[in-house]
Image (spheres, grey):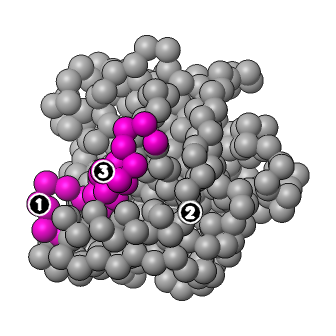
């Protein structure tokens, strides 16, 4: 792993939670029949139904991290790109607003050397103030090239804090006030929950003022379309069709829980502007993957819990980029 990765930082303008709340209440109604956005205390996320690695988000320190990118995966994999979050987060996020350690949640590619295969990673881990991984609820989802129904989910232990190729994370220092976003019945059939939030923010704050959110959402009363990457291919993926044929798609029964990060607009950092990975909570077979959209917009219920980031940190941005594989 490269030790000295290039790093860029973008300071976000501080907005009151109520300002964002009002914008979402106003603009999300174009996408959903029923919208209710409030400013609330974060619930205890270690409890049901969440069972996550932190008691809460929304405290003083909240940063969005964008590591690597699709160009390290597409057209062909760069196997040098393996990142240890337990080293990288303390080093690049720092301790100033994180005296008790760091909680990281989001979406990325899993540590392929451990599983001897490419995989999706739902990132959810807690580092103590010395950078030790003390709670790791992260999971990876793997699939084979052959059996089209095969989907395997594995839990990571505290001894594995790596991801690979690309990751989009909220890093949070503790619990506080959050935006609670409840949306029911999607009326914009071309959108999804996270794209709707991004567009609602962009409409209010414009191209010049990015707003970055990170946290989680649940999907109820609808199946969810997800994808899982197959193992790395030796055939270059040159087009969106190539990528879509390589990915495997699944439709997962509710409820699902996703870790989610999004930015209303990219301030020129070649960001992945939205990314959500999650797992099911329905108690049947274990399933996980990358969020696309709800399959049943006429009934779907979303419940999001989001912290507002004060900074974006861009780590190991690819020098040569493209727009493939960003859906
Ligand atoms: Zn993904």
Where does residue 137 sit, x and y in percent of width and height?
A: 60, 65
> Magenta residues, as a range?
186-209
Picture layout, residue 106 above or below residue 224: above
Judged left or right of residue 280, residue 312 is right
Between marks 3 and 1, how big is the CA–CA gap?
Answer: 19 Å
Query: Which of the 4 quarters of the picture holds residue 145?
Result: top left
- Looking at the rendered structure, the secondary structure element under dot 3 is helix
Q: Are marks 3 and 2 in contact (CB under 8 Å)?
A: no
Where does residue 95 sit, x and y in percent of width and height?
A: 83, 48
Between marks 2 and 1, how big is the CA–CA gap?
Answer: 31 Å
Q: Which residue is depicted at the point 57% across and 46% down?
A: 13
Sequence order check, earlier mark of 3 and 2: 2
- Looking at the rendered structure, the secondary structure element under dot 2 is loop
Q: Residues within 10 Å of mark 3 (few under 14, many from 20)?
A: some
Determine which of the numbered discs, if any, sits on residue 16 in the image.
2
Q: Which residue is mark 1?
A: 189
Between marks 3 and 2, how big is the CA–CA gap?
Answer: 17 Å
Picture layout, residue 175 above or below residue 268: below
Where does residue 50 sit, x and y in percent of width and height?
A: 52, 77
Q: Is residue 4 magenta?
A: no
Q: Which residue is mark 3?
A: 203
Which-is-in-front pick, marks 2 and 1?
2
Instruction: Say which quadrant the N terminus sits in.
Output: top right
């Amino acid at each position: 792993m490269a030790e000295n990765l290039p790093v860029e930082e973008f300071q976000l303008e501080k907005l009151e939670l109520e300002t964002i709340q009002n914008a979402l209440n106003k603009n999300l109604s174009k996408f959903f029949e029923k919208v209710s956005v409030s400013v609330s205390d974060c619930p205890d996320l270690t409890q049901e139904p969440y069972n996550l690695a932190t008691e809460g988000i929304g405290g003083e320190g909240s940063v969005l991290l964008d590591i690597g990118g699709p160009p390290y995966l597409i057209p062909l994999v760069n196997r040098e790109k393996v990142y240890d979050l337990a080293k990288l987060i303390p080093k690049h996020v720092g301790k100033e607003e994180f005296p008790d350690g760091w909680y990281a949640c989001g979406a990325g590619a899993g540590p392929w050397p451990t599983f001897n295969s490419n995989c999706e990673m739902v990132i959810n881990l807690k580092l103590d103030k010395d950078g030790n991984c003390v709670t790791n609820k992260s999971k990876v989802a793997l699939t084979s090239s052959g059996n089209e129904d095969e989907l395997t989910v594995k839990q990571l232990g505290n001894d594995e804090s790596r991801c690979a190729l690309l990751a989009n994370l909220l890093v949070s220092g503790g619990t506080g006030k959050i935006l609670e976003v409840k949306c029911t019945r999607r009326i914009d059939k071309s959108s999804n929950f996270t794209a709707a939030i991004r567009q609602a923010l962009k409409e209010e704050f414009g191209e010049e003022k990015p707003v970055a959110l990170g946290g989680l959402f649940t999907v109820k009363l609808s199946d969810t379309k997800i994808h899982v990457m197959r193992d790395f291919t030796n055939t270059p993926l040159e087009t969106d069709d190539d990528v879509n044929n390589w990915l495997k798609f699944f439709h997962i029964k509710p409820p699902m829980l996703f870790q989610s990060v999004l930015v209303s607009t990219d301030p020129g950092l070649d960001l992945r502007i939205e990314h959500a990975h999650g797992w099911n909570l329905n108690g049947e077979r274990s399933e996980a993957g990358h969020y696309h959209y709800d399959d049943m917009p006429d009934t779907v219920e979303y419940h999001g819990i989001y912290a507002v980031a004060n900074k974006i940190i861009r780590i190991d941005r690819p020098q040569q980029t493209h727009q493939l594989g960003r859906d």
